[in-house]
Amino acid sequence: MRILLVEDEADLAATLRKTLVESGFSVDVTADGEEAIWQAEGTAYDVIVLDLMIPIVDGWEVLKRIRARGDRSPVLVLTARDATIDKVRALDAGADDYLTKPFTLDELLARIRALIRRAAVSPAPVIRLADVEIETSARRVTRAGAKVDLAPKEYALLEFLALHRGTLVTRTVLYEHIYDDRDDTMSNLVDVYVSTLRRKLGHGLIRTCRGSGYIIDAP
Amino acid sequence: MPRDLSRMVTWSLRAKLLAWYSLVLVAVLATFAALAVWAVWQSGLRDFDSRLTATASVLGRAINLDSTGRYEVNLTGPDLAKFTGSDEGPYYAVWTSAGLLIDRSDPLVDPTSPRAPQVRSRGGNREVIVAGNQGALVLVGDSLGQFRSDLWRVILGFGAAAGIALALALGGGWFLVGRALAPVERIGATAEAMSESNLGLRIDVARTEDELGRVATSLNRAFDRLQAAFERQTRFTADASHELRTPLASLMAELDWALARPRASDEYRSSLAVCLRAAQRMRGVVEGLLTLARAEAGAIEPHRAPVNLASIVEDAASGVGSIAAEHGVTIHIETVPAIVDGDSNRLRELISNLLINAVQHSVAGGTVTCSISTLGPTTCVVVSDTGSGIGSGDLPHIFERFYRANKVRSRASGGAGLGLAISKWIAESHGGHIHCESREGQGARFTVELPALEARATGAPGHAGSQLSSDPTDAAVPTAGRA
């Protein structure tokens, strides 16, 4: 899952970045509104975490502009502005959630997961696919009741395919959602992860659509 | 119950106005009626008297002495008929010049001679006594009963008319006073309905162009000022809260992250550095707010002493040196000795704030110039930079607390936004003032004007300051992170 973090407070941005990366997200960070709009145009982020008081273009304007463009990425506003009018303005401008500073990291992560679930096929926090069970909140995968150990990127790939089950996901899209700007790995690694996942979870789960991508069939 | 109170006040005002109004009206009506009745009485009585006098004259002319020397009254025809016929009506009596009763039409007439012609009222009757032929005295009288009862009818008529007029006037007055006071009611209702969440309400002045309309307009203007003050306060609170929450969020998130699981020691070290920076920022905001709050409350007594601005500028510049180096900005100083009466700590804070502000708004390679000049009774310190400048829309607001002129500027480079507000206060508390000229993209130029104590009074130029600078502990004032 790829997240765009728009935060001009350098220390907080760094803290959030390392927290999100530890939680298995791919994170891009920008410090101003103009760059945020530009970034969001180039990539389909799974969640955008947006501060309101940011330089050049403020958060409300960023929301308006990306929504006007038809961007459907869930946006979580993370700001020190706690007045009702600010919340109303942000939600009306197209935000999906609003969290005021100071906050706990657990709450932020839970809200991000909730936004990702809601944007997916079904909002259930536990996804069951035949004998495979994915607990998205704990990032835990079991097969026939037994815990399966997955590397962070393997999990990210599985979760993305599972959340978009029933739809064809191209390699480009997969690559976009599990890597951030800092990664410079080759896209054929996606194929390597898929084969590892098949070995660990059974070969019937992830189907290859030759030449274009992968699909997990809806149960 | 303020609402009931206002209604009661309006009510009693209406009643009071009406009471005074009716009192005046009653007095006017009563005076008018009294004068009218008096006039009617007077003219009626005059008519009555002249009628009696005419009759008495006829009677007087009818008196003759007969051949025996006796008086005789020769009344004929209609003249006689006046005195006969009924008990009502005029009566008469005639006396000789010696006072002897000759004749009377009614035995009830007082037989005593009145002795001289006169007009008199006696027991409900009016009597006219005139001199007749042969020195006789003739009295003609008549009862005033009919006249009195006519007069009573007039009085009753007046009373009834006055009563009706009073009732109409009171009713109309009640209505008119109510109408006149309706705007007061409306003003009260509007003021009552105004609350913290509803400060935008205004009194409708479209229909009131009289005195109350002016009152309403004045009140509306007062409401405008109140609303502006309230909004300023709200914005200030929101800004202060924002400036404190931002570093607090950073602090808490970093601690949250560090404590989530065991970390390597260099990770802990970098976390603590983040926490320290957050805490320093919070200290900056809290100290700035405290300074301004105490300044506003007048709780800060400046320690005034003659100080040399040149040495203060040099101190401040060396204090800001490291920040300037970080930004790649050169600070250039042009000083002449200038002595002002001031608090050296505060003045250094003022110059430091301006220098830090200038450095933070400059691009790498830029120059910040700080110069001192004395013009007559005024000493000027000018801090100018070659940075991004301030837009004309922002210029009037830059000395407001928490106002961030340059939205382009990342917060990473700035403080809490209190530095210029504090600088303004320091300049003004020294009897001077501060202003800024700038154009977007062409740098900014801050000028502080202070009253000069003595210009170039002592020593050689460039050295006078070193002896006059205040005690050396001044140098320890922390200025970084404050602007």
Image (spheres, coloured by chain):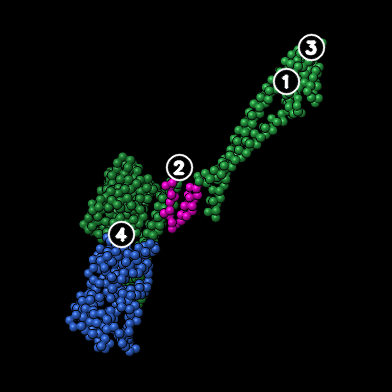
Chain colours: A blue, B green
* Residue behind mark 4: B414
Which amino acid, mark 3? Asp
Q: Is residue B40 left or right of residue B201?
A: right
Same chain for marks 2 and 1?
yes
B187 in the magenta segment:
yes
Q: Where is residue A120 in the image (x, y as percent from the top left)?
A: 30, 76
Sequence-wise first label, 3 or 2: 3
Q: What's the residue type where badge 4 is placed? A: Gly
Image spot of residue B469 (x, y percent)? 34, 49
Element on which disc 4 rests: loop
Residue carrying label 1: B77
- Residue occupying the point 67% across, 34% down: B152
> Residue A24: where, in percent of width, then height?
29, 77
Report the Cα–Cα distance between label 3 and label 2.
89 Å
Mark pair 2, 1: CA separation: 76 Å
User: Between residues A7 and A86, which one lies in front from this camera angle?
Assistant: A86
The location of residue B6, given as percent across then percent down, is 53, 51
